[in-house]
Amino acid sequence: AKDYLIEPFSNQDLSEAIHNVFNKWLKDKAELFAEDNNAKVVTFFATKGGVGRTTLAVNLATALAAKGKRTLLIDASLQFGDVALTLDLHPKSTINDIIEKDEFTPDGIERRITKHACGLEVLAAPKEPALAEAVNSKHIQQIIDAIKPLYQFIIIDMPATITEKELAILDKTNLLFLVAT
């Protein structure tokens, strides 16, 4: 725990606490901002839904983008992804389009990315839960490997399960945030 709030607290108190913890974290993680040719992969995981995993992933990604860091947010919660909804995005392409068209090159993947007004780039989850079945662990590894040289940060919002797909993500992760209540 890096901070705490005593109930009742205001929205402003919560916002200030989050910003203070984030800024302290940035100071402690200076190595994340060192020049490197490959993105740092930061993954958010929780063992259950409703604990704020997506909110934290989206806020970190938007904060990094706002600081001028080239950041990609991947919604790896493939069946019920919330990243696009959280950012009020309406992606034309998703991770499924990469797989269907066999576009595992940096250019092919970049064509499937949706850009947010804040500068953040998003690779959205499939539009329908049934389409998640088409994505496998090899696909995820190919995507991460192909785009790592293009970004400074890749933030991944994982689902609350661990299958081969999630293990593939964890294998590529530099920093893991386990979100709990």
Image (tube, helix red, strand yellow):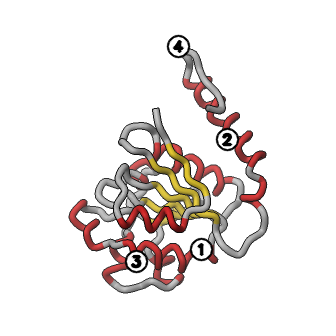
Q: Measure the alpha-carbon separation of dots 2 and 1.
A: 24 Å
Q: Provide the secondary structure element on which disc 1 rests.
A: helix
Q: Nearer the viewer, mark 1 or mark 3?
A: 3
Please count the marks in the image: 4
> Residue 126, position in %: x, y?
32, 65
**Which of disc 1 and disc 2 is earlier in sequence?**
2
Query: Label 3, on which residue?
Result: 138
Q: Write down the residue under mark 1.
A: 148
168 w.r.t. 85: above or below? below
Residue pointed to by mark 2: 22
Q: The disc labelled 3 sits on which kind of residue? A: Lys
| Place of residue 137 in the rendered image (x, y in percent of width and height, measured from the top left) | 38, 72
Q: What kind of element bears circle 3?
A: helix
Q: Residue at x 38, y 66 (%)?
A: 165
Tell which of 60 and 93 is nearer to you: 60
Viewer-nearest of labels 3 and 2? 3
What's the amino acid at mark 1? Lys
Task: Name which residue type carries label 2.
Answer: Phe
Amino acid marked by disc 4: Pro
Q: CA distance from mark 3 to mark 4?
A: 47 Å
